[in-house]
Amino acid sequence: MTVVLAEHDVTLHCGDVRDILAHLPSESVNCCVTSPPYYGLRDYGVDGQIGLEPSPAEYVETLRQVFAAVRRVDAPQRRHLAQVPQWWRVVVGAYRER
């Protein structure tokens, strides 16, 4: 985990979200902004990267686990923004039909 900015009450982290969230105290995050790697779109050459799971169902489960960890670190008055591609509806729709 790398801190790329720490000024006033703002800290920006760079690294695998799963590692970063595991090290943050509960109820310590006021704002979470993320753009999760899209399923099957890019290979960043990192072992275990999000987005290269064997199936859409496993990708959805990985994101569910990530956002459960986000919920743990949420402060009471939290805000979240997640950028997800338009084709996400197709993946989720296929997942729900199973």
Image: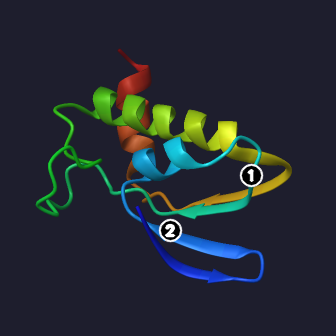
Q: Give amino acid for label 2.
A: His
In this view, 54 is above or below 30: above
Q: Residue at x 44, y 39 (%)?
A: 63
Image quadrant holding the C terminus, namely top left
Q: Residue at x 77, y 83 (%)?
A: 8
**In this figure, which residue is indicated by the disc labeled 2?**
13
Q: Residue at x 46, y 63 (%)?
A: 35
Asked if the residue at tag 1 contacts the one at tag 2, i.e. Cβ–Cβ closer than 8 Å, the answer is: no
In this view, 40 is above or below 68: below
Rendered location of residue 42, percent (x, y): 18, 61
Q: SS at mark 2?
A: strand
Furthest residue in direction right, as rendered:
77
Rendered location of residue 91, percent (x, y): 35, 39
**In this figure, which residue is indicated by the disc labeled 1?**
28
Q: Give amino acid for label 1.
A: Ser
10 and 69: which one is in front?
A: 10
Q: SS at mark 1?
A: loop
